[in-house]
Image: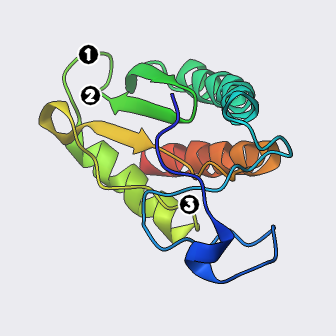
Amino acid sequence: MIGGIPSLKSWIGFTDPNVYVLPFPNCFRCPCDRLTYEGCEQECFSLGEVMFQELHGIWDTFPAHIGYVQGAGLVWAIHMVKDGTRESNPELAFDVVRRAIQKGLMLTGPLGPNYGTIKIMPPLTITEEAIRDGALTLREAIHESL
């Protein structure tokens, strides 16, 4: 489910429908051409499928260091573990986040069980191309951190 409130041009004083600047941090303007909730929900579902494919591909590449990948829509988590175990690896998670940020991919600091989980939550306006580019950057950051 998508959270937020749709933008109203009168709130922000813009008449350009392509402007995504909003007065409150949790507001969003539908990134799809369909300005209905169902259209936005479908767009996020489709992009979530791309996220699923990309993040599970990363998991397949580093199975000894990723304990799980979980998520739905555009909110995902990757749990980093010590080599071949299910024990959280906060050092690896922090290093992956640091390297990803240095490469231009904005991630929040690790959280979850023993700070071993990397949260991935792109803006609702993200494109499929940007998801794939971000996944490539994340893959590189993990590879460099090992």
Q: The C terminus is located in which quarter?
A: top left
Q: Are marks 3 and 1 in contact (CB under 8 Å)?
A: no
Q: Amino acid at mark 3?
A: Leu
Residue 89 is situated, as x and y percent measured from the top left of the image, at 23, 35
Which label number is shown at residue 105? 3
In the orientation shown, which residue stands out farthest toward the right? 33
Q: Is residue 33 left or right of residue 113?
A: right
Which element carries disc 2, helix, strand or loop? loop
Instruction: Report the disc number at residue 131.
Output: none
Q: Amino acid at mark 1?
A: Thr
Q: Residue at x 59, y 79 (%)?
A: 12
- Mark 3 touching mark 2, by CB under 8 A? no
Between marks 3 and 2, how big is the CA–CA gap?
23 Å
Circle 2 crowding by C-alpha within 10 Å: few under 14, some 14–19, many from 20: some
Q: Is residue 17 left or right of residue 104?
A: right
Q: Position of residue 58 (x, y in %)?
A: 59, 29
Q: Which residue does the numbered mark 2 point to in the structure image?
A: 82
**Residue at horizontal 70%, vertical 36%?**
40
Q: Earlier in the sequence, mark 3 or mark 2?
A: 2
State if disc 2 and disc 1 touch (CB < 8 Å). yes
What residue would you read off at disc 1?
85
Q: Amino acid at mark 2?
A: Lys
Q: Secondary structure at mark 3?
A: loop
